[in-house]
Every structure is written in C-alpha cells, then in structure tokens.
C-alpha cells in the first residue's frame, strides 16, 4: 500500500526546499562577495594610482625647490644680489668682536658668556 503524504512529517516535506534555498543563498552570497571583492580591488587600484601620481608631483616639486636652493646659495647669485642691493663688505669699524670668557672653576655652572671689551666706557 502507498504511503499517504499527509501523514509525513513537515520536516521531511520541506527538507529538499530548505536544501535548495540554502544552496541558492550560498551561491548568491558567494556571487555578491565576489563582486564586492572585485570592486574593492578596483577602488584600491585607483587609490594607488592617485597616490603614485601625487608622489610624482611632490618629488618633482621637491627637486625644483632643491635646485632653487642650490642656485640661491651659489656664490655667483649671492654676488649678483649683493650688487643689486648695493651692499659692500663690512668695514673694520662695523665688526664687533666678542671675547670668550674663561670657563668658571666651579662645577655647578655650565654656562659660558661672551663679553664685549670695555673701551673707555664706565658702567
């Protein structure tokens, strides 16, 4: 005699449907994960390209600034700018010489001071 389907348990009747839905969910989730991963790879690649371009721009600007500093520190340019500003070497009267004081004998003071020589002025 054939079995009556109405008498079968609900778990047995919905088992294949649950398996099929779980399999569809697994395949669909994997597909969504794959697309998300590819999108992240593309986005990160764009970020890398942008940062490499920015690094190239900064490196180029740094090189230009380094060349400019080298030129501005060159003796030829310094002489040219001094002539433009009508600067001349300092006269001996304009030079102030500082005399170094001897180090103090006590070990507590570690400061050194320079002193201007007294030229006829009284404090």
Image: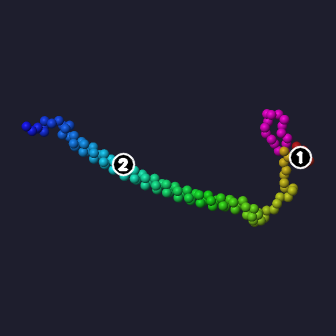
**Residue 8 placement: quadrant:** top left
- Looking at the image, can residue 81 be seen? no
Relative to residue 70, is residue 106 depicted above or below? above
The verdict on residue 11 being magenta is no
Q: Residue at x 55, y 56 (%)?
A: 55
Q: Residue at x 56, y 59 (%)?
A: 57
The verdict on residue 111 being magenta is yes
- Residue in the foreground of this view, choosing between 78 and 47: 47
In the rendered image, which quarter contains the C terminus?
A: top right
Q: Residue at x 33, y 50 (%)?
A: 31
* Main SS category, magenta section: loop
- Mark 1 or mark 2: name the one nearer the start of the chain: 2
**Residue 23 placement: quadrant:** top left
In the rendered image, which quarter contains the N terminus?
A: top left
Segment colored magenta: 101-115
Q: Residues within 10 Å of mark 2 (few under 14, many from 20)?
A: few
* Residue 97, percent from left and from top: 85, 50
**Left or right of residue 107: residue 68:** left
The residue where tag 1 is placed is: 118
- Looking at the image, can residue 58 be seen? yes
* Residue 21, percent from left and from top: 25, 45
The answer to the question of whether label 1 and label 2 lie on touching residues, with beta carbons closer than 8 A, is no
Looking at the image, the residue that sits furthest to the left is 1
Q: Residue at x 73, y 64 (%)?
A: 77
**Left or right of residue 110: residue 49:** left
The residue where tag 2 is placed is: 33
Q: CA distance from mark 1 to mark 2?
A: 86 Å
């Amino acid at each position: 005699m054939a079995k009556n389907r109405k008498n079968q348990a609900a778990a047995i009747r919905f088992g294949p449907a649950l398996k099929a839905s779980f399999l569809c969910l697994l395949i669909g989730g994997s597909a969504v994960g794959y697309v998300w991963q590819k999108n992240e790879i593309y986005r990160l690649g764009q970020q890398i390209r942008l940062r490499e371009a920015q690094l190239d721009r900064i490196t180029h600007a740094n090189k230009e600034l380094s060349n400019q500093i080298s030129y501005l520190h060159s003796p030829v340019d310094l002489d040219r700018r001094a002539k433009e500003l009508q600067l001349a070497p300092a006269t001996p009267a304009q030079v102030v010489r500082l005399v170094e004081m001897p180090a103090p004998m006590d070990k507590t003071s570690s400061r050194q001071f320079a002193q201007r020589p007294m030229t006829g002025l009284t404090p």
